[in-house]
Amino acid sequence: MARDFTSVGVVGLGTMGAGIVEVFARNGVDVVAVEVSEDALERGRAILTGSTDRAVAKGKLAEADRDALLSRVRFAVGLDALHAVDLVIEAVPEHLDLKQRIFAELDRVCKPEAILATNTSSLSVTEISVATSRPNQVIGIHFFNPAPVMKLVEVVRTVVTSTDVVADVEALCKRLGKVDVTISDRAGFIANALLFGYLNHAVGMFEAHYATREDIDAAMKLGCGLPMGPLALMDLIGLDTAYEILDTMYRRGGRDRRHAPVPLIKQMVTAGLLGRKSGRGFYTYERPGSPVVVPDEQTPAATEAALADGDRALAKVGVVGSGTMATGIIEVFAKAGYEVVSVTRGAEKSARVFEAVKTSLNKGVVRGKLSEADRDAALGRINWSATLDHLADVDLVVEAVVEELSVKKALFASLDEICKPGVVLATTTSSLPVIDVAMATQRPADVVGLHFFNPAPLMPLVEIVETIRTSAETTATARAVCAALGKTGVVCGDRSGFIVNALLFPYLNDAVKMLEASYSTADDIDHAMKLGCGYPMGPFELLDVVGLDVSLAIQRELYLELREPGFAPAPLLEHLVTAGYLGRKSGRGFRDHTRR
Ligand SMILES: NC(=O)c1ccc[n+]([C@@H]2O[C@H](COP(=O)([O-])OP(=O)(O)OC[C@H]3O[C@@H](n4cnc5c(N)ncnc54)[C@H](O)[C@@H]3O)[C@@H](O)[C@H]2O)c1
């Protein structure tokens, strides 16, 4: 018969433990919540009441339900209070010796049939289990932060965990309204194994002054639709916890350098900058435990709105190219009130671009987002040309021609001859070094990357790529232009993948490697990232949309530039591309799209 969990114990009421208490108590389970001292107990109680009070204030929980929830929780110092519970979940700091000590004591205190679970993110559940005399009743139940919100639970079974224990815990997760994926005991399980390399890389970018914290976070939120940027997420996780997870993953997970914690993390932990829980991490918070960010010395002075007002000197913009990106960019500038000169390689191409822009603007009219008069005005602002000479009097040129360095260099050399002095020359390249393009001109200080995302009229992000020769004035103009377009411009250095692709594609590649190693299925990995980390799409869904060939090309570029062994393209990705499985566009990628 399946176990009936009527009371559970939670050990450690920090970031995770307090949330786990809430999950159980909300679902009618009695909880014994245990801490190491009275002070810590009070802090844990405050996290729980703070969270439930917020839920009441937001109308998500009735006052009576909150009171009932809180009445189900008994607080105690010391593990002895757990003698009668059916299940214990341990959520103390990520140290193996501490966890082993606690499990040995739990083994002594708890009734023989009780299940002992750890919420560890990266330590070996097997090593924890052998500290007890009942390793077959030890299991990992890995909740995600914040536990009351995130739907995923990773259930980690070791080689000795009994199958009935696994089944009972899976049933319990369903009762709690969670979606579980059951996996074996490997460092980082699914989600953290894919997440932490990315987080560490983002901290590395910040440490190297590659981009500001605001720009790194905005890039991943707006470029990938993530619920929060990587540095804000590090603050939520807690830098001490993140450090331990990375360190363990590095040691247990094959010494992949990408998991070796970036030195800044340790420095911040030593300095007490632990993230939200201590009131300060990458950002500064109103008070310890508060999610509200307050300005500090790193907060940028100028707001986007001020920038938008700041530079309206640019009136006329040239856009070179006739593909998807050029078409979208022409529309974006024309809609924002700029006079646009579109240069294509002939009247036929111009006619096609015109039709595409018109169709797109018409969609806005049908949806009630644009008036007919505004559509006509936008179309009227575009001048169509087949010769670069018409760019002689523009204030900004945006190049969006084929992604081939020789073509772009030749074009920039021509622009250098034709355009008036002081004009900003921008390339939309997503993979070529901007400096190569800049050096094809006599005015590299005026050259910048403006990396729009597809579809340009919808995507709110533009990466502004500075080379080592770009002048501060050019960057400021690029920022002002992005703001005037209603886009968020993030400034970064001229490195392969800029911010978004450099952080996104290695993660996708890691997911392919995980699948290839048969650790989990594509469905479970997609689930884990969506339900555990709030990603809008799982990695395999996204790879099929982006195209496996495109993804492989980007990953190869990153690998070639950084020579990071962990960036080597997954063999499975190469094989699928060779086999013509390119994703949605070819009908088959990681999934078969012809049968849907
Ligand atoms: N932070 C996250 O986002 C996250 C997500 C999933 C899992 N985890 C895992 O959850 C566990 C807890 O992490 P956290 O971020 O909540 O840590 P935390 O530092 O916020 O909280 C740990 C709590 O454990 C208490 N504690 C320490 N020793 C104890 C003892 N002997 N007895 C009882 N309580 C004790 C501390 O007082 C503290 O309140 C770790 O294994 C971590 O890897 C963390």
Image (spheres, rainbow, N blue to C red):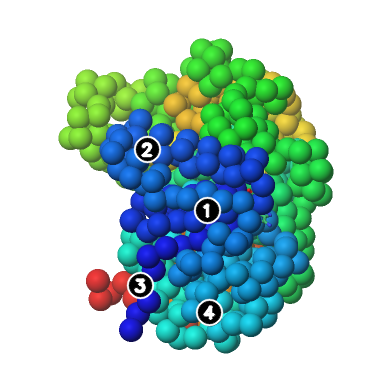
Secondary-structure class at tag 4: loop
Q: Which residue is mark 1?
A: 33
Q: Which mark is residue 538?
A: none
Secondary-structure class at tag 2: helix
Q: Which residue is mark 4?
A: 112
In the visual, does 410 lie left or right of 33? right
Q: Which residue is mark 2?
A: 55
Disc 4 vs disc 3: which is toward the camera?
4
Mark toward the start of the polypeptide (1 vs 2): 1
Secondary-structure class at tag 1: strand
Residue type of the residue flagged with mark 4: Pro
Where on the picture, by quarter, is residue 39? top right
Q: Is residue 231 visible?
A: no
Where on the picture, by quarter, is residue 434? top right
Residue type of the residue flagged with mark 3: Asp
Q: Which residue is mark 3?
A: 4
Residue type of the residue flagged with mark 1: Ala
